[in-house]
Image (tube, rainbow, N blue to C red):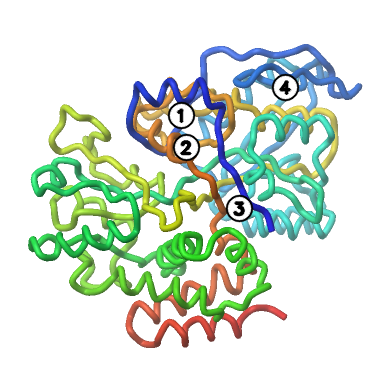
Amino acid sequence: MRKSSIRFAAVPIALALVAGACGSDDEAGSETETETEGTAATGAEGTTAEGGSAAVTGDFDGAEVTITGPERDDPSVIAIQDTLAAFGEENNIDISYSGDADWEANINTQVEGGNPPSISIFPQPGKLADFARAGSIVPLSDEVDATVDEFWDEGYQADGEVDGEQYGVPVKTDLKSLVWYKPAAFEENGYEIPETIDEFNSLMETMVADDNTPLCVGIESGQATGWPFTDWTEEMVLRQSGGDVYDQWVSNEIPFDDPAIVEAMQAVVDFWAPENVFAAGGSIAATNFGDNAQPLVDGQCMMHRQASFFAGFFPEGTTFADESDPDTIDTFYFPDINGDRPVLTAGTLAAAFNDDPATMAVLNYMATADYAETRQRLQTEALGGALSGFLSAAKGQDPEVYQPLEQGFLDILANSELARFDASDLMPADVGAGTFWSEGTSLVNGQQTAEEAAANIAASWPS
């Protein structure tokens, strides 16, 4: 079993984080990039010190590289396209990105029809692995593999590794182990940020005694209703049982109804006891996951556990990690149990459908800190300076391109000793995007016990 260690380039990030003390879920790019001359056709590549480009460069004679992916909002599309276009112009490659609301269905159709893009961006490592085993995507070249190794810690590389070969390049990171809160409300009530799960539970008890509601919770999400429950369960598996058990659970080496998993599911139900929860929709299952921001702002609850992307759900004009604003919103790390500060992550990985030199050159650039910084800078600019919703765990980035809230996210990643990708995205779709959601929802609704829900999910695992 792998144990992921997430550590950034310690000196540059640590110095910036001492100065800028908060966190968010976007990142930007530096104004400059350093490249070392070379040509992919001959296998030459340049690598620089951390923060440099390490990009394969050269004149690729107007080659065309097409890229598809699920990100389709204007700021993301603009940032991805403009970041890649600049690299393409320098290297005589025509690069185009297309965001697709029906990416998952359409990439299947394109592959089956023999007309895939040059590169596609996968939100689920499990689907990438399926394509790899089917021979639809190609392993990374030695040059790209070396660049991934330079800029990405082992835990992130493992998400794109299939049967001992590296197929995926990490290009976006979502940090899930966050609790959103209003610092002024904590200060007014004399509450302190908890450092352990025991302290978190004690804090909730104190809040209830003070006639404050600890949590805003909602798991409604249309056909995907239940997915926030899976995130909470994954957090608790990591904290209670560690990375090895988590890996065995994801691969079904231990069944879903193993006592360790049942314990984690029950812990979530206990967190969500009626006295602890404000549900804007009347019940947890009827409350849309996005409808938890306004109640937090309004003081109808004290905390909400959700990923870094959640900044985009707060009302317009909300400030983040701004000590001068009494209404500002901030985050803290969802506390641990064993001192290993585990983090739950998600994100995307890029993979190639051909091994053309230009395709590999583009994929190589996407693996670098320069790509992450540039995309972040452009995406922030496209939003007029607002939080971008983008985050990357690539090593060597300049943290100054991040806003204070975002720097806090990087700080959490940098100080974690254990990281794992969202389990439901790694499991077979019938489970991770099926029974885990539906049976979890039934559990939350009180229609069955944790043991019964876990047994039903276990029985649904494909043979």
Which residue is tagged 2?
Answer: 390
Residue under numbered circle 1: 379
Mark 1 and mark 4 residues within 8 Å of each other at the beta carbon: no
Label 1: how many Cα within 10 Å (few below 14, some 14–19, many 20+) = many
Q: Is residue 328 left or right of residue 89?
A: left
> In this orientation, which residue lies closer to the viewer: 202 or 350?
202
Q: Position of residue 374 (x, y in %)?
A: 54, 23
Residue positioned 23% across, 43% down in the render: 315
Foreground: disc 4 or disc 3: 4
Q: In the displayed structure, would residue 69 be above or below residue 20?
A: below
Dot 2 amino acid type: Phe
Residues at marks 4 and 3, CA–CA distance in whole angstroms: 28 Å
Mark 4, secondary structure of its residue: loop
How packed mark 3 is, by other alpha carbons closer than 10 Å (few <14, some 14-19, many 20 or more), is many
Q: State the separation of the CA atoms marked 2 and 4.
A: 22 Å
The kind of secondary structure element at disc 2 is loop
Q: Nearer the viewer, mark 2 or mark 3?
A: 2
Q: Which residue is mark 3?
A: 103
